[in-house]
Amino acid sequence: MVDHMSPEHAFTAFVREHGRRLKQALISSMGGQEGQEATAEALAYAWEHWEELQEVTNLAGYLYRVGRTRGLPQGNPTVRLFADPQDGSGDPPWVEPRLEKAVADLSEMQRTVVMLIHAFSWTYRETATFLNVSPGSIQRHMDRAMSKLRRDLKVAQDA
Amino acid sequence: MRELEQMLRDVGDQLDATYEDPDPEVTLTPSRLRAAAVSDQPPLVWYAPQGPSGKIGWVHKTLVAAAAIIVVVVTVSLFSGNEEASPVDVVDSPTDLDAPTPSLEAHEPAGDIEAGVEAADASLPAQGHFLDVSLTDTEWCKGLATYSYSWGSVTGRVIVRAWSHADGVRSGPWVSAVSGDGSKSENIEWGSPLSPVPTELQIEFELAEGTQEPIRENMRQDKNLNILDKAWTETISCSS
């Protein structure tokens, strides 16, 4: 669809269409700050290899994997999803304080699926296509993740 | 009612707002990306980390380098007695500083943040502050859902969770909130009526990390609250 466009325009159009979602996915996977930096790494890679990447069918999903690889922090740091309420950015988030750790403790796939679908309102099908897995697999990851979150947060009703 | 899914949506909204690009229409251009890629520098200054931790954007680095050059040139000119050279001449020479720096102000170095911390430390409350928990509207049991508490001056945060009891079943938490640091009062609401209508509500308070020890002591003394470590519970009977 972008064959008639210059590389500059095609790349800009791609970023406008997919950049936000790419960032949401990388933040879901890696945490806020790391996900943002990984997005920059992935987009820089995309521009450097723009011509050859035209053959890739799911380019956004491909760049997601690039971002996870190139933006991977050293060691095994704790995933920090939320902005630090002490950083002067405003009021603390009105969320359960144990939620961040509970989400961070999920497996990477479970965390990514939960965040994309519930936090960023992606559909199951969009998530499955982006992550290149079946919708059934997404459903299973979601079910397990939500069960674990409810258990960790003691959200389930109890007599 | 704040379901788990709703809390996750709130998190997503917050993340979108926190990491939103300031002005992608202006800043995200392929020419800048290409220039960054060729120069093997961190590619996007507008994606540079915000706050004191992490890497510094390349424009910031360029500015620092330019400032260092100015210092060197001025120093050399002073010692060489060359009065024709001046900092203005150096700034006017061709540099990368022509490039717009849209988000540079958002990446202030750690100095200001550290200063802010010092200011906060200086305002720590002295002894004598207290937490006064009060219910202002008993209708909240039915779903009107307004609940407030107040205190003198808390350094730290109070975490509040509300559970309802109805027909022998405990359910919730319906509310899960973090009070603001230093606030004098908070109102907590949930959007939809609780169903079934509870016979009583149980409010759990928990002091967040960093809450000042003297305040806990005063709470225990002044209000005779049953504080166990850093958490306690109040149970309120709902009006029919």
Image (cartoon, coloured by chain):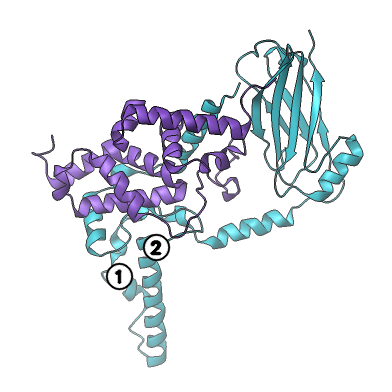
Q: Which chain is purple?
A: A
Circle number at residue B60: 2
Residue picked out by circle 1: B92
Label 2's element? helix
From the viewer's side, name the closer residue of B71 and A120. Answer: A120
Q: Colour of chain B?
A: cyan
* Disc on the earlier residue, 2 or 1: 2
Marking on residue A154:
none
Relative depth, front residue between A9 and B239: B239
On the image, which quarter does residue A131 sit in? top left
Residue A120 visible: no
Residue A22 image-quadrant placement: top left
Q: Where is residue B157? Give x, y as percent.
A: 70, 42
Apparent side of residue B120 relative to residue B31 in the rendered image (left or right): right
Asked whether A20 or B7 is in front, the reply is B7
Read off the chain for label 1. B
| Distance of label 2 from label 1 (alpha carbons) | 18 Å
Question: Relative to residue B35, is residue B145 drawn left or right?
Answer: right
Q: Are marks 2 and 1 on the same chain?
A: yes
Q: Quadrant of the C terminus of chain B?
A: top right
